[in-house]
Amino acid sequence: MAKKNKWKQIELLINLESETISEVIHSLDKIIEWAKINNSKLGYFPALYRKVTKRVKQGIHDGYFDNGPFMEKLDVRFANRYFEALEAYIQNEPCTEAWKMAFNVTNLWQPIVLQHLMLGMNAHINLDLGISASDTVGDGDLNLVQADFYRINELLVAMIKEVKMDLAKVWPFLRVTNFLVGKGGNWIAKSGMIAARNFSWKSALAVHYLDGEARVDKIKFIDDTVVKVGENLLVPGYFTVLAILLIRLTEFGSVKRIIEILE
């Protein structure tokens, strides 16, 4: 009976592909629901991702972007790359190596919550975003959407304080770290986001004017590069690893509770 229920729960994660931002949010809801039921760390990233998606949806509604319809199409295509990778992984089918790495790590005890989030963002922003932008533009001029592409940065930066407050509920000592580091922590996070956006824009330009095997090979090269970034996030150095272990030992809350905090 338990095995049957498990397969029924996995069915919640099939057919996630969306056509509107509202459907994207609904699909993320399904993943988060499944993760809570199964006490799975696969729910960490989509909990944060849903917040970002809601901000983008509101931004489109408020006229924040120059080309709202394009941004919705980009957001949907962007999300579908994540959904496609997750569905493939759940069904033991091939997916991009960057996502495979991020998903595999959810089965490990050692990584802290922040590492799970960063590995998800690494795969999604550094790999998926540029490809999604190119796919959405199609035969059009990619440079015409660069301003809106970068404008999302401002939304993400605006969320840094909120995310840090959520993480502090998981690791209470983060409040002390934030106090000691001050604005330096925000600067580091902001710089990381900008670097990722710059990388993804260069990736978009790199694949946009290619087709066939040349495009496939370029995407594979980007995927391999992103995996190397992920490896550095996962094992950043001897002393940092010791610090991460200390954080992991003092993180508070069950997997389900952490997902609820991140929502």
Image (cartoon, rainbow, N blue to C red):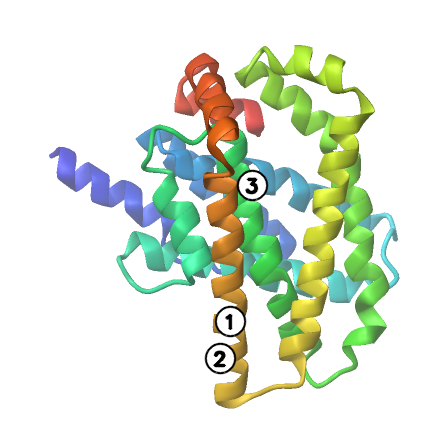
Identify the mark nearer the N-term, 3 or 2. 3
Q: Quadrant of the N terminus?
A: top left
How far across and how far down the image is residue 140, in percent?
Answer: 75, 83
Q: Which residue is drawn at 51% across and 71% down?
A: 221
How far across and how far down the image is residue 125, in percent?
Answer: 62, 54
In the image: residue 8, left or right of residue 65: left
Nearer the observer: mark 1 or 3; the answer is 1
What is the three-letter code of the residue carrying label 2? Asp
What is the three-letter code of the residue carrying label 1? Phe
Q: Residue at x 35, y 60 (%)?
A: 88
Identify the mark nearer the N-term, 1 or 3. 3
97, 259: nearer the viewer = 97
In the image: residue 67, left or right of residue 7: right
Q: Which residue is drawn at 72% across and 65% down?
A: 201
Q: Mark 3 points at which residue?
A: 118
Mark 1 crowdedness (10 Å alpha carbons): few <14, some 14-19, many ≥20: few
20, 184: nearer the viewer = 184
In the image: residue 80, left or right of residue 10: right
Q: In which quarter of the image is the C terminus?
A: top right
Rendered position, 120 above or below 68:
above
Q: CA–CA distance between discs 1 and 2?
A: 6 Å
Q: Which residue is drawn at 66% across and 74% down?
A: 134
Q: Are marks 1 and 2 in contact (CB under 8 Å)?
A: yes
